[in-house]
Image (cartoon, rainbow, N blue to C red):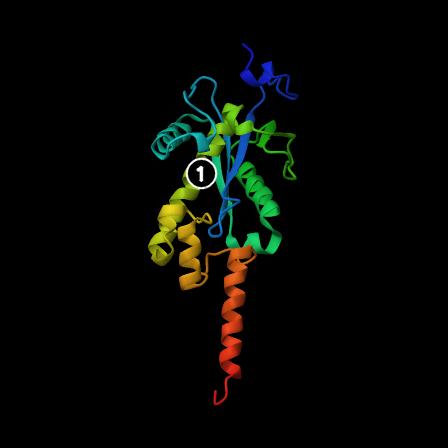
Amino acid sequence: MKSRSATLGLSLFDRGDRLVCGVDEAGRGPLAGPVYAAAVILDPERPIDGLRDSKKLSAERREELALQIRACAIAWCVAECSEAEIDRFNILQASMLAMRRAIEGLCVTPSLALIDGNRCPVLSVPSEAIVGGDDLIPAISAASILAKTSRDAALQALHLEYPLYGFDQHKGYPTALHLARLAQHGASPVHRKSYAPVRAVLEAAMRARADIKQEPGQ
């Protein structure tokens, strides 16, 4: 039986007995927290119903599917790049690094990696970028779900450490609430200093400190 992806005429999809992993990331847009990536090799003997782009699923359904993926997949791995690495390398390179770490962390080596998006990280295995792959390729959908649920859990944990910012509500994305809390409380150690809204807050704080030092009598 042909897979749905094969019917679309995409290349490198005549899988045969190859181990194919799907790869996706979560958390490129937020102002805080790591970027996460996951790699998943699904087991054709243990199909999982309902896999699709994690953004099109409810939080409850994502968690249900994440449990099934971990239980049924041949192999899976979740990896991350920290805020410091994002600031050092930029978010694109950090995302690529997180995906590479996820693939290299699999307990078995895949024959082919299918990457959601329009570019691939530098890998030791063949790879192909699939635009919109998280809603086309079940293995990429599974990776999308694991990356998203893992990152959401991490931001819930960061909320306990930095409760002033409301990470449990916005997961680090630049919502009105997050921007207001950022302006009110300044940047935390887990904010991405290279992102414009965070950088603006840090620069404003530096200017304020400089003004205080220049005041007469200080």
Against 107, residue 203 (above or below) is: below
Q: Which residue appears farthest toward the top when viewing the image? A: 1
Q: Position of residue 2 (x, y in %)?
A: 56, 12
Against 140, residue 88 (above or below) is: below
Q: Position of residue 129 (x, y in %)?
A: 63, 31
Q: Residues within 10 Å of mark 1 (few under 14, many from 20)?
A: many
Position of residue 95 in the picture relative to residue 183 (left or right): right
Q: Which residue appears farthest toward the bottom when viewing the image? A: 217
Residue at which label 1 appears: 148
Position of residue 86 in the picture relative to residue 150 (left or right): right
* Relative depth, front residue between 212 and 5: 212
Q: Secondary structure at mark 1?
A: helix
- Say which residue appears at 61% left-offset and 20% top-offset: 13
The image quadrant that residue 97 belongs to is top right
* Relative depth, front residue between 212 and 17: 212
For badge 1, the amino acid type reads Lys
- Say which residue appears at 41% left-offset and 57% top-offset: 180
Q: Position of residue 16 (x, y in %)?
A: 59, 16
